[in-house]
């Protein structure tokens, strides 16, 4: 999914306060799936999600890349890739791509944009990101797999530095009209006592889940039957 840079002007201000921790990141289980040095943990402690240097970490184990405008999921610091911070990425083949793009598909549903969901795309198999042409839910058809259940606007919490020796910036949540929201700018001089995604979403799928048919614009079996016979199907009598 392409996101416009004007939503994140704060990342250009250099308002950072903390140096990156030295943890390893993985895009799948076992050492063979260790990411490059550009793949870094979003926080310095425990098992956490990972994003690329210079990118923004979001709740939902998601990341946003400024250069390409791509929202994506990549990996985590769990070498066994079992922790909740490890994105499932719709079970995509890591040999084809270690990361997956994300596309929003209404009703708080995000889909994977990867080689399996876009068979006509020319996909670069390197670990680096590249620009993606946005895909609609309907265009993915039976390949429309759910990556994440979350609102259309995800919550940012960390801005990673552009270099390994750089420093990290943080987004500050606040209450507005009784609802927790956040600044779209990194808050100068701000560092929370505990750095965690402050927004939580329903558990994502841990196996392949095809998106609801109605989001794809595919008629339900009952509607399809009506179209085939040319008249309304008999409804069950109310009891």
Image: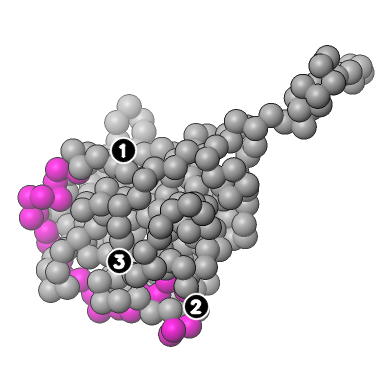
Mark number, residue 155: none
Mark number, residue 128: 3
The residue pinned by badge 1 equals 181
Gap in Å between the C-alphas at discs 1 and 2? 34 Å
Badge 3 crowding class, 10 Å Cα cut-off, few under 14, some 14 to 19, many 20 or more, is few
The residue pinned by badge 2 equals 29
Badge 1 or badge 3: first in the primary sequence = 3
**Residue at 12% across / 61% down in the picture?**
17
Quadrant containing the N terminus in the rendered view: top left
Residue 131: x, y in percent?
Answer: 30, 52
Choose between 23 and 189: the one closer to the eye: 23
Report whether residue 51 is seen.
yes
**Residue at 18% across / 38% down in the picture?**
6
Badge 1 crowding class, 10 Å Cα cut-off, few under 14, some 14 to 19, many 20 or more, is some
Residue 216: x, y in percent?
Answer: 58, 35
Gap in Å between the C-alphas at discs 1 and 3? 31 Å
Residue 116: x, y in percent?
Answer: 53, 58
Give the SS element for disc 1.
Answer: strand
Residue 20: x, y in percent?
Answer: 20, 71
Give the SS element for disc 3.
Answer: loop
Q: Is residue 164 above or below residue 107?
A: below
Residue stretch in magenta: 8-32
Badge 3 or badge 2: first in the primary sequence = 2
Which of label 1 and label 3 is nearer to you?
3
Choose between 102 and 122: the one closer to the eye: 122
Give the SS element for disc 2.
Answer: loop
The colour style of the image is one colour
Badge 2 crowding class, 10 Å Cα cut-off, few under 14, some 14 to 19, many 20 or more, is some
**Residue at 25% across / 52% down in the picture?**
68
Which of label 1 and label 2 is nearer to you?
2
Is 200 situated left or right of 223 in this image? left
């Amino acid at each position: 999914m392409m996101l416009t840079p004007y939503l994140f002007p704060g990342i250009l201000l250099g308002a950072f306060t903390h140096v990156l921790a030295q943890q390893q990141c993985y895009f799948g289980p076992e050492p063979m799936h260790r990411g490059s040095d550009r793949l870094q943990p979003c926080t310095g402690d425990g098992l956490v999600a990972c994003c690329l240097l210079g990118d923004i970490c979001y709740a939902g184990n998601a990341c946003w890349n400024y250069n390409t405008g791509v929202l994506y999921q990549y990996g985590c610091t769990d070498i066994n890739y079992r922790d909740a911070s490890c994105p499932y990425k719709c079970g995509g083949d890591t040999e084809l791509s270690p990361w997956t793009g994300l596309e929003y598909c209404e009703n708080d549903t995000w889909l994977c944009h990867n080689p399996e969901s876009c068979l006509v795309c020319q996909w670069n198999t390197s670990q680096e990101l590249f620009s993606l042409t946005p895909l609609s839910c309907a265009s993915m058809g039976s390949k429309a797999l759910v990556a994440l259940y979350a609102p259309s606007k995800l919550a940012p919490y960390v801005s990673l530095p552009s270099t390994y020796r750089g420093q990290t910036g943080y987004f500050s949540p606040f209450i507005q009209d009784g609802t927790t929201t956040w600044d779209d700018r990194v808050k100068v001089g701000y560092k929370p006592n505990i750095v965690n995604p402050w927004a939580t979403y329903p558990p994502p799928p841990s196996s392949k889940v095809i998106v609801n048919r109605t989001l794809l614009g595919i008629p339900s079996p009952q509607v399809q039957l009506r179209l085939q016979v040319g008249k309304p199907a008999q409804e069950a009598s109310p009891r």
